[in-house]
Image (cartoon, rainbow, N blue to C red):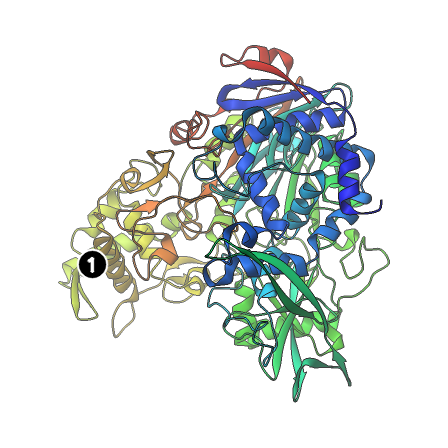
Amino acid sequence: MSSASSWAAEVVAGGRHEAEITWTTHGVPHVVADDFAGLGFGQGWACARDHFAGIVDHVVKVRSERARHLGAGEGDKHLHSDLGYLALDVRRRAADAAARQPAEIVDMVGGYAAGVNAWFAEHGRDALPAWCRDASWIGPIEPLDLFGVYVDLAIIASGRNLVEYIGSAAPPGADEHEAPPPPPPEPLVADPGLASNGWAFGGDATATGRGLVMANPHFPWWGEGRFWECHLRIPGALDVYGASLVGVPFVQIGFNQHVAWTHTFSRGSRFTVYKLDLTAGDATRYRYGDDERTMASRSHTVDVLGADGEVRSVTRRLWSSHNGPMLNLPLVGWGDTTAFSYRDANIDNDRFMGQVLAMNRAGGMDDLQAAVAEHQGLPWVNTMAADDTGRCWYIDASSTPKLSDDAQDRFEAALDGDLFTAMLYEMRVALLDGSDPTFEWLDDPAAVEPGLTPYDELPQLERRDHVFNANDPYWLPHATEQIGRHQALCGRYRRPVSPRTRMNARLAGGTGPVTPTGPGGTWTRDDAVAAVLGNHSLMAELVQEALVERLRAAEVAGQATVTLDGEDVDLTGTADLLAAWDGRYELDSVGAVVFREWLASFTPAELADAGTLFAIGFDPAAPVVTPHSLAPAPDEGPDPVLAAMARALRALTDAGVAADAALGAVQYVERGGRRVPLHGGFECEGIANVIAPIGTLARADLEPGPAMPPAVPGRTERTGLHQGGYPAVYGVSFLMSCAFGDDGPDAVGLLVYGQSGDPASPHHTDQLDDFAAKRLRPLRFTDEAIAADPDRSHRTVSG
């Protein structure tokens, strides 16, 4: 291989491709081909029909060509992004990764790119959404471009969030043409609350005596990171159904004839930020142990479209420590005495595609476990899986840095004792002392890469009843069994878990408000759906009754008026409203929004342990049932429970939302020119079914998002409350319940926000109404099931 471009040309020239595509209800493609090149071609063609613009947009970003087409951007956003991706050397890493792939992966990716281009060659710009139809960046892609996208996806929980801070980093006193503006005041990682639920049931807990998997990932509804549903088959070699990320071959969550699996976002750390003590008088040298080290630098050039229409080159010199690129860290930047760099556990993860393929064709649990152990390519997810023999398994096999015992102890102590370290960790950033060699990642010969934790030291659990995860750390994968302590960067051990995790544990463990109905209290496919969409609030179970009593007592005592900031808020009638509420977040639930805003008046710490909300604090020996019980009113002074209710009612008033509004009247999605009411709730309410106006991935794409109504200061960032209600942008995406029986997999599901990213497509919103009605469709896996679909259409694609 002489260069990245010559490699790409060799793949494109690899021959003619052909695939058969049958679309079924909701535009789900079933792609059949004779080889991987043909399968990739068919998958790429079908995905481009729904998401061509999104695929190319992602490619342009990792090519570092945003500024060439769009200018420097507000606050030089596009310029910094382009420079950041150049500093991460994505193009070179993509070529290196491609060179190390087996022929099947090369053929699949090459075919995928060819399929994307073939769709565009046939349909052209007129078939694109209006927002990008005339964009200068629209055009064909190369296989190497896709490998660049896969580098970016591998660092979605790490470097992807940092590119603008990398691209804008410069030492004090840099030349004027190199000096960036001050760092932006946004959080380092825009949202730390990315959520999903995943359950796997073993044969001891299911009606069939075989495995069952409930997949409920919560991912963005707009832009990058969306799922797309498909079924892929090479007769005799591969047959897999599920969801893939847009632009990515194979299936990332789904099932085949023998095994099903799902993922949730891991709470562990995929990167570390290093604080460097700088040498006096030279901000490009730093102390390292008893010595000093000099940073390395490299100049990068990007083309930038000017306001006059001319494209000019901009060159910046960017720096790195021995651990990695320097950062223009928000709020602190790069000072005279302190600077920050980072090291990424996934920047060289070229095992991702091989990992996915091996899982796609696993013949059972042994094969699946062997695939994860061999490739160790899962970048940032927990995995829950079950097979047709009734085994179920949990693992957090994410790429995780390995620290010494001393470094782990000191890091844990800093999390509890240093405010800055703790604050960054709440934003998923692990801060270490980069001037102390103690905090170097350890090179273990058993690890797949230097500095990473070996597979045998990663947390996992196999059982025959159930395992689950809802984004809290690894140690609680079962309702009653805990995993022992692992690497500190796998996540904090035996600390309070979210209300949603607690509800997941109760539901999966069969002790929740929705219980299994199969023989002997065993789970069926439809039971799992009913449980995850039950919309029961754990927090309501814990405190609703006592809250009603407190409110009624205040009314009887003539204390139902609370003064907030000089304004009187009358709580009269709120007790009756909440007493009539069923504790659920259904479309017709009245009282749900009041309870939501009341909870949001407490801090995350108060929601997790004893204090002003709970009387009984968190107990690591009983994490599913603690904390609990409403805290009593104080002997003197204002009652924080009543004050919280006053804040809730005032917030709703400020938003123009009636306290007695039904949830479906104020929680909705605006999509494709339609407003669809939605059931579901948020993290702090302890609901499995997440629908939210906040909490999505940081947007790094160009697709226009929904027009959001005005925010409500102090509330929008907590609950997503806007003027008029809760406009959803994030939550349940691909929903799947797959149960194995004597005849193989039997699955139902939905891709809630629809297959297509084009608002003009009939498949842009056609699944929202089904979700609102909790009406899932069969996931058609056999030839007979596909042939029976009433909306079936077919085409042969070639090129």
The residue drawn where x is 70% and y is 25% is 39
Figure quadrant of the N terminus = top right
Q: Is residue 494 visible?
A: no
The residue drawn where x is 36% and y is 66% is 612
Q: Could you say which quadrant of the image residue 140 lies in?
A: top right
Disc 1 packing (10 Å; few <14; some 14–19; many ≥20): some
Instruction: Look at the picture and state if 503 lies above or below 445.
Output: above
The residue drawn where x is 77% and y is 31% is 13
Q: Position of residue 546 (x, y in %)?
A: 31, 54
Q: Position of residue 67 (x, y in %)?
A: 55, 54
How many numbered discs sit on the rendered protein? 1
Instruction: Look at the picture and state if 383 lies above or below 157.
Output: above
Residue 257 as seen in the image, left or right of residue 67: right
Camera-nearest residue between 736 and 675: 675
Instruction: Tell me the amino acid under the disc marked 1.
Output: Ala
Tell me the element at label 1: helix
Camera-nearest residue between 146 and 696: 146
Q: Could you say which quadrant of the image residue 606 lies in?
A: bottom left
Figure quadrant of the C terminus = top right
Residue 306 as seen in the image, left or right of residue 299: left
Instruction: Look at the picture and state if 539 lies above or below 280.
Output: above
According to the image, label 1 marks what residue? 553
The residue drawn where x is 72% and y is 75% is 295
Camera-nearest residue between 789 and 108: 108
